[in-house]
Amino acid sequence: MDLGKIIKYNRKTKHLTQESVCQGICSVTHMSKIENDITHVADEIIQLICDRLGINLKEEMKKIEDLEERIKQFQVSLIWKDTRKMHIFSGELSKHKEFLKHTHLYTQYLICLSRYEMFHGDMRQAFSKLKKLYQNNSKFPQYEKDLIAHHFGIYYLLNANSEKALYYLKLTSDSYRESSPEFYYHYSLAYSNLELKTLASYYSEKALKAFKEQHNMEKILETEMLRINQLSGDTADERNFIINQYLELLRLTELFRSTHPLIPKILHNLGYEYLEKGHFDIAIRYFEKSMNLKSTEDPYYLSSYFSYINCLIQKRTISVDIILKNIEDGYQLANKQQDEKFKLLFTYQKLQLLKKEKEILNHLTKELLPFFHKTENHTLYKIYGKVAFDLCFNQKLMSQAAEIAKRMLD
């Protein structure tokens, strides 16, 4: 498959023309077909060309086999979230990037690289790679089409757009789904975010069973957290049950690895549960613990900080000036990270604290909701759309309320 590309790569590396390489061996036309893998060619002709280029074909093919194994290991390290190994494989493969471009492995390498970039919060680079690959989708074998669709699904899940994530996840083939337990985890996550709990529960069960068969403790813990997220907390007893489940998961995760990246997420979710119960002091402690375990550059840090400030606002015993200072710090951090979503959310929080209803409505309808609409963040659009609808209704702005309700339904 890569024979012609290897010849072309080595010829171009040595700055040789097709004519100079094939002279006395074959025609330039035949040489062009060889390089593009569109003709059958005798072994002796290939050997003569390789001799002229000074390459050992067996060594070149062995190099491809080794790189293929490295890409597989890179992919596994990304699934298992093994930070040390993913750094090693990323570094090793980057040294062979130009060579990989001339092999059938390049697409899979780019897909892994996009996931590596998503892991580090570089969403623009990841999206750029996936978009280019998707535009050339028709050229790829089914497995690579499935990988691209799956990774686009992951991208949109990380960007809180579960509808779009589900669209891409549904593009995958049945054979791919059955061979990829992680697919069912992401499928379940998308349905869970859309509050389609029956489907979410069904696919999380499939994912958990497969991860247990693989003895993949990393993904078992993640799936267990997903299953807790799917529980209903409508009553006090149900919410207490959820809290106990999170505490048990936290204990298991800390036993497995005291620095596990899931720990700050569990702490954040515990903070949220206590916030919903109205136990603001406990919620604040959990949000603080979560933030203390995260870098301020972590894409999830702002989420915990925003929720922490919500606790301060609802607690009503902290001075307005102190809370405003916290909001300003959050806004500046979002600005530094170029995170438009949280810049708008911290602005909303400030107006909410100062109880400026007209300014809140104006901010929601002119900035926040249009941003969520533009970025296709339907979950947050519905949450803040309800706030805007209530404000419009209270201020007897019925046509505006109707327009917001229509958008929410769409």
Image (tube, rainbow, N blue to C red):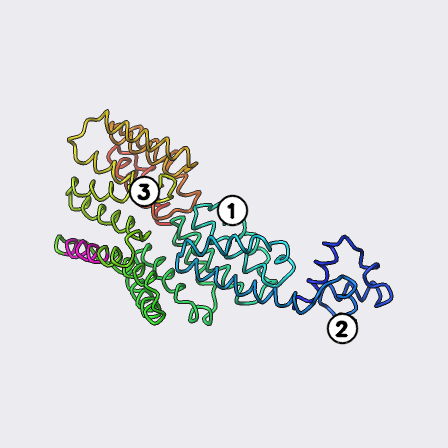
Mark 3 and mark 1 in contact? Answer it, CB < 8 Å.
no
Query: Percent position (x, y) of residue 365?
Result: 36, 35
Residue 41: mark in rendering: 2
Give the farthest residue toward the right.
24
Residue found 54% across the figure and 51% down from its top: 129
Pinpoint residue 67: horizontal percent, then vertical percent: 56, 62
Please say whether residue 247 is one of the residues in the magenta stretch: yes
- Which quadrant of the view contains residue 407? top left
Q: Where is residue 318 in the image (x, y as percent from the top left)?
A: 18, 30
The reply to whether discs 1 and 2 touch (Cβ–Cβ < 8 Å) is no
Q: Name the residue under label 3.
A: 303
Q: Which amino acid does label 2 sit on?
A: Val
What main secondary structure does the magenta stretch of the protein show? helix
Q: Label 3, label 1: how many angstroms apart (C-alpha)? A: 22 Å
Disc 2 is placed on an element classified as loop
Q: In which quarter of the image is residue 205?
A: bottom left
Look at discs 1 and 2 and give the one toward the viewer: 2
In the picture, measured across the screen, residue 171 lies left or right of residue 65, that is left
Please determine whether, in this image, residue 18 is positioned above or below residue 264.
below
Say which element carries label 3.
helix
Q: In this view, does 286 lie above or below 215?
A: above
Residue 290 among magenta residues: no
Q: Is residue 272 above or below residue 140?
A: above
Q: What residue type is labelled 1?
A: Gln
Depth check, mark 3 against mark 2: the one in front is 2
Q: Where residue 243 sits in the image (x, y, percent)?
A: 18, 53
- Residue that mark 1 sits on: 125
